[in-house]
Image (tube, helix red, strand yellow):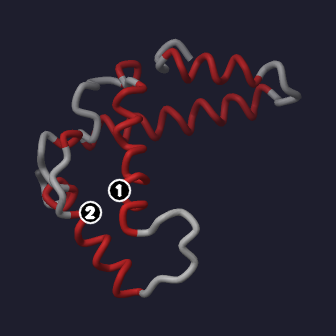
Amino acid sequence: MKKMPYYVREYCISRLSYPYSICTIDAYLCDFQNFFEWMVFKGYLSSAKKVEDVSLNELNKLKKTNVVIRRFLPKGTIKTTVRAVARIEKWMNNYPRKLFNYKSPTQMVRGG
């Protein structure tokens, strides 16, 4: 648990006050660690070189993707077309991101 960012440690400690078993909390930690290791390995988190360096600021940048989707599909949108979703996907995948050092997700997948 010491290798995890402080906010993950705080989260897991807060779960101890609920009726969660130690096994459940350990599973949370394993999932967090696997996710963060993958993000660091892939270079998706530009400032993190190891798991404990993953900042909330970096994670909040990822969260902004939802905001981008809402530009095209406002909350409450019930119907859309496959063509419209494909257009949004293409735009998002080709949009340069500061998170990726101003490369697009498509460029990152192709080897950056």
Foreground residue among 65 and 20: 65
Foreground residue among 70 and 107: 70
- Residue appearing at x 67%, y 23% in the figure: 12
- Position of residue 4 measured from the top left corner of the image (x, y, whole percent): 49, 20
- Position of residue 92 measured from the top left corner of the image (x, y, whole percent): 26, 63
Q: Crowdedness of circle 2 by 10 Å Cα count: few (<14), some, many (20+)? A: some
Badge 1 marks a residue whose secondary structure is helix
Q: Quadrant of residue 100?
A: top left
Q: Which mark is residue 92?
A: 2
- Position of residue 58 measured from the top left corner of the image (x, y, whole percent): 34, 31
Foreground residue among 68 and 56: 68
Between discs 1 and 2, the one toward the N terminus = 1
**Which residue does the numbered mark 1 point to in the structure image?**
68
Vertical placement of 17 versus 72: above or below? above
Mark 1 and mark 2: Cα distance apart in space: 8 Å
Vertical placement of 109 versus 63: above or below? below
Badge 2 marks a residue whose secondary structure is helix
Q: Is residue 93 left or right of residue 4?
A: left
Looking at the rendered structure, the kind of residue marked 1 is Val
